[in-house]
Image (cartoon, rainbow, N blue to C red):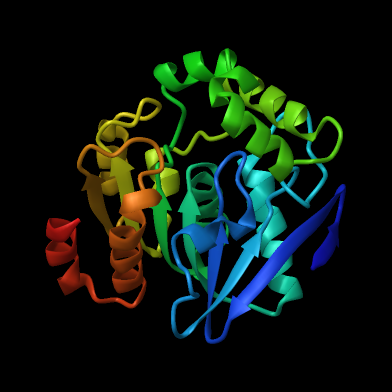
Amino acid sequence: MQLQLAGADLHYDLSGDGEPLLWLHGGFGLGSDWTLIFNPPPDGYRIVAPDLRGHGRSNGAAPMYSFKQSAVDVFALLDHLKIDRIKVVGLSGGGITALHMATLQPARVASMVVVSAPSAFPEQAKAMQRNFSEAMFGADQGAAMRRRHPRPGQLDALLAQVRRMPDGPDPDFSRADLGTITADTLIVFGDRDPLYPVTLAVELREAIPRSWLWVVPNGGHGPVFGPSARPFAQMALAFLAGRYEDLPALAGRA
């Protein structure tokens, strides 16, 4: 399905029935990436999964990527679907988008799981972003990326956006900004993330009023796929259901 926005056509998928749950993919991802974690759709949820602006089947990429614009796009999608309040899972750039949503319109985000998403890019991330290229994917993954983003020049535009991120203003959440978040928030970081040190996760935990932190042992950036998918899904769904007492035991089994 497509929603026409100012300057973009936003593709989105809907799956399952029940309470709305928004999946926000990371950079170079797709809305359908949720199936790598929640498959089949979790009981009791209707998953809303957009391809964020410029990604996959959505167009409208600008020279500089704006996570805030992505949040505005998602709110327009929720308005279109007549969804006033929603739970969110956001990965990496999708997590930054979720943070924007929760600070722009706090009452509309019931709870959220934010994975590998910093309040601002640290210098170690900026150094990698400035030199980012398709070669860094490797041949097989690079070919897969071109299949995921198949329009002429689409992947090249996304790569160029990453190289410009260190010079952009987004993200740049202050402690005061994060303090306005009213959503119950689970912060998930890998302790071996090459982009974002775990100290950033601790800072988020301290700034967001109702927040919990799960550090994934030996986890890299976006430590929620492959063998980690099942424990992450269990943790995320327990959190979104408000079963906070289950979190320590689930973390111990992960």
In the image, residue 206 sits, relative to residue 15, either above or below, namely above
Question: In this rendering, does residue 91 appear at all?
Answer: yes
Picture coordinates of residue 149, whole percent (x, y) = 74, 41
At 76% from the left edge and 29% from the top edge, which residue is drawn?
Answer: 157
At 28% from the left edge and 60% from the top edge, which residue is drawn?
Answer: 231
Q: Nearer the viewer, residue 19 or 227?
A: 227
In the image, residue 108 sits, relative to residue 155, either above or below, namely below
Q: Nearer the viewer, residue 14 or 87?
A: 14
Dividing the image into 4 quarters, which one contains the C terminus? bottom left
| The quarter of the displayed image where residue 83 is located | bottom right
Relative placement, left or right, of 164 versus 215 is right
Picture coordinates of residue 127, whole percent (x, y) = 48, 13
As drawn, the residue found furthest toward the front would be: 140
Picture coordinates of residue 79, whole percent (x, y) = 72, 72
Dividing the image into 4 quarters, which one contains the N terminus? bottom right
At 22% from the left edge and 37% from the top edge, which residue is drawn?
Answer: 218
Picture coordinates of residue 47, whole percent (x, y) = 56, 72
